[in-house]
Amino acid sequence: MAPTADSLPAAFSADGAGLRVCILRARWNDAIINNLVKGCKGKLLAAGVKEDDIVVETVPGSYELPFAAKS
């Protein structure tokens, strides 16, 4: 089984300073996706990524995600 954030050693830390990150999300199933994006942004901010360096892009559904990721 792959490790989860909760199973990492307490000494693990990530330094996201200087990174620019794009979160690509679908509008489909907003109730779940909104919480995933919120959690992702929270972890990125905690790792030192600046708010201005986090971009959230939205596509209509999951079918469009790979096409948006390529552009």
Image: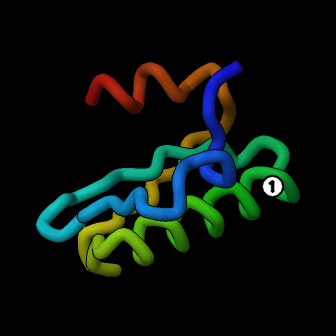
Q: Which residue sits at x=64%, y=65%?
A: 39
Residue that sits furthest to the left in the current view: 18
The quadrant of the picture occupied by the C terminus is top left
**Along the horizontal axis of the image, is 38 left or right of 64?**
right
Residue 55 sits in which quadrant?
bottom left
SS category of the residue bearing label 1:
helix
Q: Which residue sits at x=46%, y=21%?
A: 66
| Spot occupied by residue 49 in the image (x, y as percentages of width and height) | 29, 71
For label 1, the crowd category at 10 Å Cα-Cα, with few meaning under 14, some 14 to 19 and many 20 or more, is few
Q: Which residue is mark 1?
A: 30
| Spot occupied by residue 52 in the image (x, y as percentages of width and height) | 27, 78
Q: Which residue sits at x=34%, y=66%?
A: 54
**Along the horizontal axis of the image, is 20 left or right of 69?**
left
Using the image as rendered, state which of residue 64 and residue 14 is in the foreground: 14
Count of marks overlaid on the render? 1
Residue 62 sits in which quadrant?
top right
Using the image as rendered, state which of residue 7 and residue 56 is in the foreground: 7
